Image (spheres, helix red, strand yellow):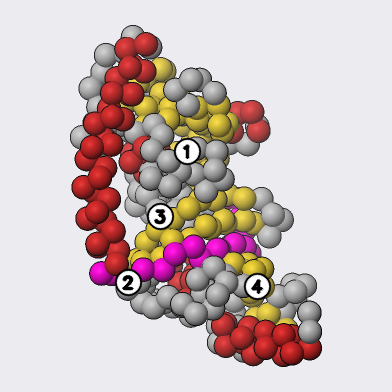
Amino acid sequence: MSIRKLHFLVPIFLIFFGCSNKSSKFSGFTVTDSGIHYKLISLGDGAVKPETTNFITVNIAYRTLSDSIFFQGLRKFQLASPNYVGSIDECFMMLALGDSAAFNLPADSFFTRTLETSLPKFINKGDLMRVDIKMLEIQTEKQYQLEKEAFLQWINDFGEYEKVIIKQYMDGEKLSIAPTLTGLYYIPVMKTNGKNVAVGDTITVNFEGRFFNSKIFDSTKKRNEPFQFVYGQKWQVIEGLEEAIGMMKEGERSLFIIPSKLAFGEQGSSTGIIPPFTSVVFEVELIEVKKGKG
């Protein structure tokens, strides 16, 4: 890289983050005035930065500092103003279109103030957590609404086709059940009289996700790593699993047929394993319900 290019990138980096340049205890990281440790991974075009009320699409992953991932996925949502110093919303505001960065921030504040729940048992009070974010798209409210209207018009036709695929699968499996109002199919395998699930509970599940051809795309059983998350909070699981688990009781095992609109949607999974508009089957075992604040 030429000296001229190097001199050009340094001020862009500082303008890009718009933050102080304090040293961090983490190698390669810098600290903002609000106490967030950040490290730029890749630089986008730098021309478009998000504003409050914009809709953004991000690839996002939550990890412990020991590098254990407890959530990873593609998310689209409306950006809000940070409601406290050092919130994850500040991280989104720091990224321009195409940028990706790693952020170490207090887990206490993220869970208790952003998610409004208690810390999961795999994170200790006072710990930091790592959030990896890549900014994929930034839209104004008007752009988002226009895109949504066009998509809803198109999906009406595609939805009918997907219903046929689901019916063919159910006929092949000799299943005769009605869907929920959202289109989810619930097949209890082993029912119990255990605790119900409520918003704010910390729950532990084993799940196995597979396609209609029985090919498995994800399994906590095979990894021997039950998945723990806080029920009812954003960015934890796909919408269909959220609804599914809410129908179960502690100790229960069930099958769920989840249409694409409740699964990985029109874009598919962020890993590329699940194609767009793909209905999936999840076998779920609800191992433990630890009651939260509600």
Task: Point out the tag, 4 or 1, that comes first from the N-terminus.
Answer: 4
Q: In the image, residue 125 lies at what x, y percent?
A: 59, 63
Was residue 94 drawn as part of the magenta stretch in this picture? no
Q: In the image, residue 52 lies at what x, y percent?
A: 36, 77
Q: Which amino acid, by three-letter code, is at mark 4?
A: Leu
Q: Are the residues tagged 2 and 1 within 8 Å (C-beta)? A: no
Q: In this view of the protein, can residue 37 be seen by the observer?
A: yes
- In this image, 224 relative to 172: left or right? right
Residue in the foreground of this view, choosing between 25 and 261:
261
- Identify the residue shown where x is 21% and y is 47%: 153
- In this image, 131 relative to 114: left or right? right
Task: Point out the tag, 3 or 4, that comes first from the N-terminus.
Answer: 4
Which residue has dot 2 on it?
Answer: 140
- Identify the residue shown where x is 59% and y is 67%: 100
Q: CA distance from mark 2 to mark 1?
A: 27 Å
- Identify the residue shown where x is 55% and y is 26%: 216
Residues in magenta, as a range:
121-142
Disc 2 packing (10 Å; few <14; some 14–19; many ≥20)? some
Give the foreground label among 3 and 1: 1
Q: In the image, residue 204 lies at what x, y percent?
A: 51, 38
Q: CA distance from mark 3 to mark 1?
A: 23 Å
Q: Are the residues tagged 3 and 1 within 8 Å (C-beta)? A: no
Which residue has dot 1 on it?
Answer: 275
Which residue has dot 4 on it?
Answer: 40
In the picture, the disc for residue 234 is 3
Q: CA distance from mark 2 to mark 4?
A: 25 Å
